[in-house]
Image: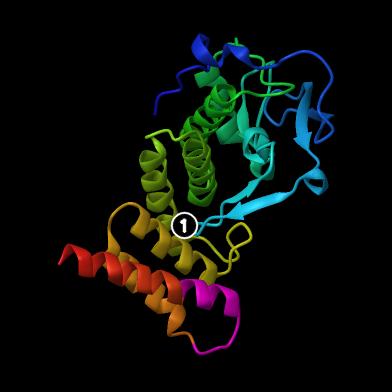
Amino acid sequence: MSVTGATGGPAGTGGQGGPLPPELYNEDVTCALCGKKFTVTKVRMSRLRVAGRDTDFNVTYEGLDPNYYTVWVCPHCGYAAPESAFTELNQAQKEALLAWLGGRKPTVDFSGVRTWDTAMAAFKLAIFQAQKRGARPSVVAGLCLRAAWLCRAAGDATEAHFLKAALDNYIVAYDKEEFPIGKMTERGLQYLLGELYLRVGRPQEAVGWFARVVEDRSGEEPQIVNMAREGWHRAKEVLKGAG
């Protein structure tokens, strides 16, 4: 996967000086790879106001997009990962990453206020490194899904590429990982798989995954069940239109 902007180019507008907006704050952390301290910029979610919700769990906010700050990038060694998985490195993974990074430092400043280009460069670095170190498929999937959300907000056509990558990795996670996966129950991931299949143009598979949720009679997670029922109808409409 290309990491355009991670070593220069359009993403070089990151790390803007000046005071941070009230929604952001800095925090010192220790790199899980090289052990050096650096500063990350984080989001005060309590300051944000929800503007809308998409059917694939994307929440949009007025003004600032918190997805810009999902990925931490160490300025000393270049290690990039989401906060939720930043410390998930065993010795073999550390050795693989250190060998690949080869002591090269990022030429982009990922601290402070990020632009869209800088945020995408951080995601591409994190996705590539997650694959390189053999991270859990759900970690790769979550990064790809959030990258797709960033593309959607900007009207960028590579959204479809990231949605497909998220789908492929979540399928593997569904078969191999224990639940909950992230914050998702099995029912929640079944719903998301249906939604992703629908978004990548495979409504027949979407119907099958939505049906798994709808046919569950446990009475748990009624909101997810209702969303799956609506998704099932949307997928059927797409099939009807295609047939």
Viewer-closest of 130 and 34: 130
Q: Is residue 10 visible?
A: yes
Q: Nearer the viewer, residue 204 or 178?
A: 204
Please say if 192 is above or below 41. below
**Location of the N terminus (image quadrant):** top left
Question: From the viewer's perspective, is residue 82 above or below residue 96?
Answer: below
Q: Position of residue 170 (x, y in %)?
A: 45, 55
How is the structure coloured here?
rainbow
Q: Is residue 38 left or right of residue 169?
A: right
The magenta segment is: 217-228
Q: Return the residue found at the far left.
A: 243
Q: Which quadrant holds residue 224?
A: bottom right
Q: From the image, tell me which residue sits under label 1.
A: 173
Q: Please identify the quadrant where the C terminus is shown.
A: bottom left
Residue 210 at x, y percent in the picture: 40, 72
Instruction: Report helix, strand or loop for mark 1.
Output: helix
Q: Residue 126, position in %: x, y?
A: 55, 32
Image location of residue 19, percent across then percent down: 84, 19
Is-magenta flag for residue 151?
A: no
At horizontal 48% and vertical 85% (from top left) the residue drawn is 216
Q: Is residue 227 magenta?
A: yes
Q: Residue at x 61, y 57 (%)?
A: 182
Q: How packed is label 1: few (under 14 Cα within 10 Å), some, or many (20 or more)?
A: many
Q: What's the residue at 61%, 20% (across, down)?
A: 78
* Direction from residue 23 to residue 58 in the image, left or right: left
Q: Which quadrant would residue 88 be assigned to in this image?
A: top right
User: Is residue 106 in view from this perspective?
Assistant: no
Q: How many marks?
A: 1
